[in-house]
Image (cartoon, rainbow, N blue to C red):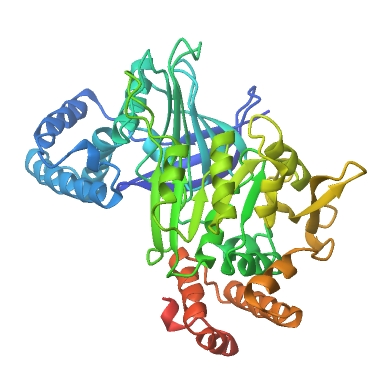
Amino acid sequence: MADKLLKMYIVESDRVRVKVSIGQKEGEFVRNYLVNIPEYGKGTEALLDSLKKNLVDDSSLKIERMLDQKFVEEVKERFSEKALKILDKEVPQLSAEERGALVGILVHEMLGLGKIEFLLADGQIEEIAINSAKEPVWVYHKEFGWLKTNVLMNTEADTQNYASIVARRVGKQITILNPLLDAHLVTGDRANATLFPISSRGVLFSIRRFRREPWTVTDLIENKTVNSDVMALIWLGIQYELNMIISGGTASGKTSFMGICLPFIQPNHRMISIEDTREIMVPSFLHWVPMTTREPNPEGRGGISMLDLLVNSLRMRPDRIIVGEIRRQKEAEVLFEAMHTGHSAYTTVHANTSQETIRRLTSPPIEIPIAMLEAVHLNVVLFRNRRLGVRRLLEIAEFIPEKRGGDDKESIRANVLYRWRPADDVITKQGDSIRLFDELSLHTGLAADEITKDLATKKEILDWMVRTKIRGIEEVGKVMANFYLDEGIVLDAIKKNQKPVWVQ
């Protein structure tokens, strides 16, 4: 069996363009991801080392500023300009393309993660995994799944050094005494590391790569993850400050889905988000206060937990509270108490159906009282179909409190409103609302026909956004903001069936 080429494309990172080839090699059972990284001789390597010494003397390069993406880009530009001047003087015979490639590699080594930067620059990659220095780096490709690359780490120390760099930039550390790390890169990508001997084969380092352009509601409607009927209902619930829990399995897209819902919030509402690792992104003009937890130092001091931030957020006059994920009883109790005291809250939880969400929340280790669950109005369940390689909204349900049997004890059941039908890959209406419309009428004074009309208007706006390719996070946010400011502006644009200038 001969080698088979499946795909080929170009990836660019910091002025360095490399060719990526994906194929199946003879005698191997795993497909390969081959990146054509430029290789240089000892003379060029010595020149790069000399350049590093000239560039490292930069007093403005402070570790605490390395999470500011704008600052990092400025530093890269400054380094690149200085390096290009030195190369022009030292090796004038090099072409502009060769000089640019050398500078790019230098920037990768000094301010990034070396060869891993080429993998991070590939928008088709979702995950990068270094299992040890003895085997190639693995990547998870959107189209082909797990692939083995031709990128190798020189030593275990190199991998540990990358993990330490990432940790220091977010005020953490990874050591023999503290061998686990969960952090994020300046790009928002999530990094996780485990040191030897906890990971018995060597230093384990993985990066979950997030889209450089966040998903928006337009993207998810277009790729059939959701439909406009479901999103109109969610938009209505968020507009009128109903509480929502997003459920799903690992990598089902819970956090991404929560992010696409946040532009539905009014611009004059104060949002506070609480996460272990910064993942959420919202339009720049929203009133958003992001907060992240912090692990304690080796002496056990200085740690800031999600519970600390959640309790503190209630003193900050929030209109909306967004919690990355609830895992413990205390966190859940405070969040649900916030719901009961009039704060609109959104969070995620690991569960595969709406009924399982109820069981998970009312069973150990979370185990909140059933009565508290009445505060949840909507439960969105997401599903990742590994066979087809797609993500779908599996269910959207409302939680209905009711009496149980003859003991008259209270229980909660899920009333499924919409469900995905895998046979023909469509989301269909499953049942009528029992509680949701009553809650909306009670709190807004809207009659049933007014709610129905509002849903139809929202669906029309969402369909128009898909047709006119309004997909950037800022563009989508401006549509929502203008809708709240003056609904007529948006409806006039729909009549013209084109992207208005105020979106751009």
Residue 155 shows in the view: no
The number of numbered badges drawn on the structure is 0
Which of these two is toward me, 343 or 204? 343
Q: Is residue 88 above or below residue 375?
A: above
Tell me: 295 left or right of 319: left
Residue 437 shows in the view: yes
Q: Which residue is depicted at the point 78% across and 45% down? A: 355
Q: Residue furthest left?
A: 89
Which of these two is toward me, 438 or 219? 438
Q: Which residue is depicted at the point 16% across and 28% down? A: 49
Q: Which residue is depicted at the point 52% across and 79% down? A: 483
Tell me: 418 left or right of 172: right
The N terminus, quarter of image? top right
Tell me: 400 left or right of 299: right
Q: Is residue 189 above or below residue 201?
A: below
Pinpoint residue 439: horizontal percent, then vertical percent.
70, 67
Which of these two is toward me, 84 or 372? 372
Pinpoint residue 461: horizontal percent, then vertical percent.
61, 77
Task: Please identify the quarter of the rendering in which residue 430 is found.
Answer: bottom right
Q: Is residue 289 above or below residue 465?
A: above
Pinpoint residue 234: horizontal percent, then vertical percent.
65, 64
Tell me: 491 left or right of 431: left
Pinpoint residue 57: horizontal percent, then vertical percent.
9, 35
Q: Residue furthest right?
A: 406
The C terminus, quarter of image? bottom left
